[in-house]
Amino acid sequence: RPQVCPGRAAPLGFTPDARLSLPVQPRKLVATIRQALSLARIESANLNEATVRSYRFAGWMLDVEARQLTSRDGTTILLDPRECDVLKALLMFPRQVLARPHLIAMVWGARSEVDNRTLDRPITRLRRHLGDDVRFPALLKTVVGVGYRLDVDVEKTD
């Protein structure tokens, strides 16, 4: 049984805000629980088990099976497998920050020994494909020190 320090709550099992000072403000407790549930949902996601055939977002459509990204004007771009998997992971969790380690685990596998910077190439290429400005991206945003967020609404088709 873990030892609890006076005035501190027991560890919750995840890194951010792993300990809450007592007394806990209700808003902070709710936010911490939501964050824990969100992280658990992201960590349990499997790109290969998803049943979604296509995603629509910001005038774009991703055909998952064909790995084709189609623009509003009909231009089609064939994505390499890693680009497609990174985009699919971001589309599965729109408007949510995905930490770099979570994205790497979803795309390369949880047991892989992939460098943290390996994600840079697919992200850069996706931004180029989407016409997103690298310095001031509108769609694929960097959350400094954490990861990435696809900042659009997404429509899924089974």
Image: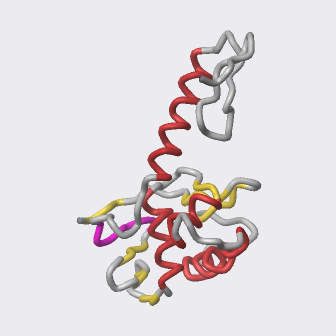
Q: Is-magenta flag for residue 55?
A: yes
**Colour approach in the figure:** secondary structure
Q: Which residues are magenta?
A: 52-58
Question: Percent from the top left, x then y, of residue 157?
Answer: 26, 65
Q: Is-magenta flag for residue 122?
A: no
How many callouts does the rendering have?
A: 0
Instruction: Write down the quadrant of residue 125 in the picture.
Output: bottom right
Q: Determine whether 116 is above or below 7 in the image.
A: below
Instruction: Write down the quadrant of residue 73 in the picture.
Output: bottom left
Question: Percent from the top left, x then y, of residue 91?
Answer: 45, 63
Q: Residue at x 68, y 38 (%)?
A: 16
Front-lying residue, 43 or 61? 43
Residue extending farthest to the front is 1
Q: Determine whether 26 is above or below 155 in the image.
A: above
Q: Quadrant of the C terminus?
A: bottom left
Q: Quadrant of the N terminus?
A: top right
Q: Residue at x 47, y 74 (%)?
A: 85
Q: Residue at x 70, y 53 (%)?
A: 146
Residue extending farthest to the left is 158
Front-lying residue, 149 or 3? 3
Question: Percent from the top left, x then y, of residue 118?
Answer: 68, 76
Q: Residue at x 42, y 70 (%)?
A: 59
Q: Determine whether 113 is above or below 148 in the image.
A: below
Q: Determine whether 149 is above or below 113 in the image.
A: above
